[in-house]
Amino acid sequence: MVGPSSFFSKLLVGCMLLLLVYFLYMDAKLYYRIQHYPLRRDFDNASNVDSEFFGSCDLSPLCDVTVKSLMLDHPNVYLFSPLATIIDRLFGIHQISYITPNMISAFHVVVALASAKCIASDSLVYRRVGVGLFLIRSMLDELDGHVARARKNMHGENSEIGSVGFFVDGMCDAIGTVALLVGCLVFLKNNPPRRGYMQLQAIIPQVLDIAKDPGAGVAYKSKITSKKVLHKLGCLGAQMLLSSTAWNRYIALYQNLLERHEVTEQQAECQIQAFRSSLMWSVAWLWRMFNPHAFLNVMLVAIFCDKLWEFLRAIQYVGFIILLSLVCISEMHVQEVQAFIFKTSSNNTATV
């Protein structure tokens, strides 16, 4: 069960399942789009865009396909990005000069602190409110990027590595994540999980009347110490740091390889082939599942379902194994893509 048994809880679980189905459907549609439509939208010739397939290109995540959009987690791509566009349309935020993307980033830190305060509460209701607040923070995180791109007339997700906005956004994300972890730490310290329980009926059945008292004969083991709680949260924090570092690194590398414009016509064709390859899709999809935003999303679901401790136990060491394996796969794939685009074309040119 999800916390207290209630119709509302079951309804929300049903909504989560529907979201999963929607994400899988959109993934299938995105893969079809990549294979059958031009990767870059031709803004000079609108007829090149099939509006029946893409819908409104300002809202659809299927129009402007970039490396980063492939490696972003599902909620960011399919929910928060269109929602940020709608909010910007309603309020014209990118046209208001005194509202800067960095101001939005700073504001979502405040929302994250409020979320952490709620998540530290003993009440499941307040913790669920905290989850909702953190989702609002995630939407604001997408909004600051949308506003920045709109003012530069950029289309599609893109990381401007080395820019001031990139570092400010990264710092604000880090503060929000640390605040969430601290909120979880406070909650688990105030409500320490137990190691389990053991039945004593077989040892002293003559002393306890199980029929009258179902809890009789059950001795709960000791509570988990604060040191163990801190250790498991530290492991999760380390995994998020590793995931964030590697994720940003491979976004930068793939952008440089697949979205570089200063290439020959033959190299551009190789870029398209590499982008459309099943291996590229597989690597990018794995980063969708294990990037830092995805870790946060799963953690929020665990908090909402009152299963935070179970999540921390499950991910403690497995997360490191998955991330290190994904880093190795990505590193080998980057080398293969680089060789395919540049070395192969160079050899063909020399032969000619």
Image (cartoon, rainbow, N blue to C red):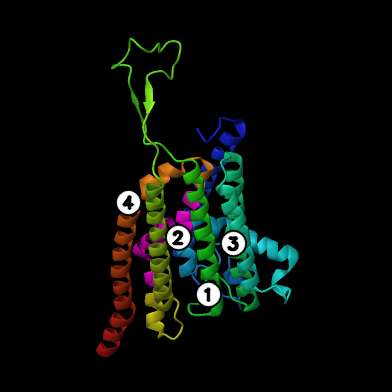
Drawn side of residue 158 relative to residue 133, left or right: left
Q: Quadrant of residue 256?
A: bottom left
Drawn side of residue 215 relative to residue 201, left or right: right
Q: CA distance from mark 3 to mark 2?
A: 17 Å
Crowdedness of circle 1 by 10 Å Cα count: few (<14), some, many (20+)? some
Element at badge 3?
helix
Find disc 4 in the rendering and name its residue: 318
Q: In the displayed orientation, state which residue is furthest to the front.
A: 207
Residue type, numbered disc 2: Pro
Which mark, by number, is residue 292? 2
Residue 165: where, in percent of width, then height?
56, 76
Residue 138: where, in percent of width, then height?
57, 59
**Is residue 204 shown above or below 34?**
above
The residue closer to the viewer here, 8 or 262, is 8
Which mark, by number, is residue 81? 3
Residue type, numbered disc 3: Ser
Q: CA distance from mark 4 to mark 2?
A: 15 Å
Crowdedness of circle 3 by 10 Å Cα count: few (<14), some, many (20+)? many
Residue 280 falls within the magenta-colored stretch: yes
Residue type, numbered disc 4: Val
| Residue at (34, 59) in percent of width and height | 323
**Is residue 9 shown above or below 269?**
above
Residues at marks 3 and 4 touching, judged by CB atoms closer than 8 Å: no
**Is residue 49 shown above or below 348?**
above
Residues at marks 1 and 3 touching, judged by CB atoms closer than 8 Å: no
In which quadrant will I find the C terminus? Answer: bottom left
Element at badge 4?
helix
| Callout in the foreground (3, 4) | 4
| Residue at (29, 65) in percent of width and height | 328
